[in-house]
Image (tube, rainbow, N blue to C red):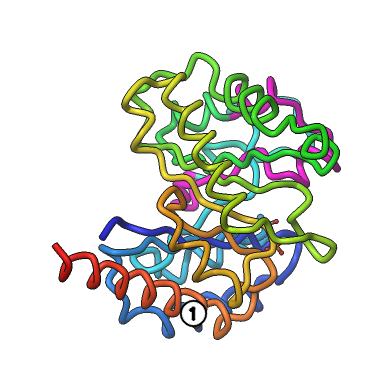
Amino acid sequence: MKKIYFGSNLKMYKNTSDTQEYITKLVELTKKISREKMELFILPSYTSLFSASNLNTQNFIRLGAQNVSWADEGQLTGEISVPMLKELQIDLVMLGHSERRHIFGEKDQDLNNKIKNALKHKLTVLLCVGETLEEKKYNLTREVLTKQLKIDLYEISSDHIQQLIIAYEPVWSIGVNGIPATPEYAEESHKMIRKILKEIFGEKGNIIPILYGGSVNRKNARRLVLKPSIDGLFVGRAAWDAENFSALIEESLDILESKHAKLSSSN
Ligand code: PGA
């Protein structure tokens, strides 16, 4: 069975003590699950990263930041650099979340600079891509994903391929007003992304995990993970309660294991 990823972006929720409590509980609830078959990561707020990292639970839950600067230092008020993250033992950063793109106007060219710098410093980059509702209406999903991936990953050597994870998050599916993508729609988009990654990196593009995100919950998680092109789930609201998230993870793993067992017995 291939390794499956589960992660959550805590956005601007949970202060330092909430985050510590949440991570401690999530470790407790999930520690019996072998990390060989799944990787679990959490992206807390910047102010919570230091204390979260001091919990020393990174063997169970990888910690990442929600954004990072393209520069290592400079006159860049309000920014946080990659070396500052590394000082906290953080080796993962999310870039290009839809809220960064659409509320803060982050451009693909900026993302390309940020990704290049993070990769140079050996961080893993979780790159988020996805089309808006309007772009979907005009049937532009393929074009949008191509543009985002080709600019965001411009001039990135395939030597860095092991440091990349993609999250496909259609903008219309994210948050309280989001409509979850059907597993079939998500599967089609994941296939498109895989094709574009292969155009960029050749066959090596096959090894980049592609996660689905956007209104994932305990009702739809199992149907999503069963899709062959979905390598994991990137969960917002449904993950912010540790018990709900661990149940979602267990249920997803159970269904994958029974599918795997059925396949091996029929072979
Ligand atoms: P949601 O958030 O699961 O609450 O829709 C997803 C995200 O923003 O990554």
How many residues crowd mark 1 within 10 Å: few (<14), some (14–19), many (20+)? some
- Name the residue: 59% across, 50% down: 186
Q: Eyeballing the image, is 176 above or below 130?
A: below
Q: Is residue 155 left or right of residue 129?
A: left
Q: Nearer the viewer, residue 67 or 88?
A: 67
Q: Position of residue 33 (x, y in %)?
A: 32, 76
- Name the residue: 69% across, 44% down: 97
Q: Nearer the viewer, residue 3 or 1?
A: 1
Q: Position of residue 70 (x, y in %)?
A: 62, 27
Q: Is residue 5 left or right of residue 220?
A: left
Numbered range of the magenta stretch: 86-114
Q: Secondary structure at mark 1?
A: helix
The amino acid marked with disc number 1 is Ser
Q: Nearer the viewer, residue 2 or 11?
A: 2
Assign the N terminus to one quadrant of the image: bottom left
Q: Residue furthest front?
A: 266
Q: Is residue 99 left or right of residue 215?
A: right
Q: Position of residue 102 (x, y in %)?
A: 83, 40
Q: Eyeballing the image, is 112 above or below 33?
A: above
Q: Quadrant of residue 73?
A: top right
In magenta stretch: residue 97: yes
Q: Is residue 70 left or right of residue 39?
A: right
Q: Position of residue 235 (x, y in %)?
A: 60, 63
Residue corresponding to mark 1: 246
Which quadrant of the render holds ligand 1? Answer: bottom right
Assign the C terminus to one quadrant of the image: bottom left
In magenta stretch: residue 100: yes
Q: Eyeballing the image, is 200 above or below 252?
A: above
- Name the residue: 40% across, 79% down: 30
Q: Quadrant of residue 15?
A: bottom right
How many numbered markers are drawn?
A: 1
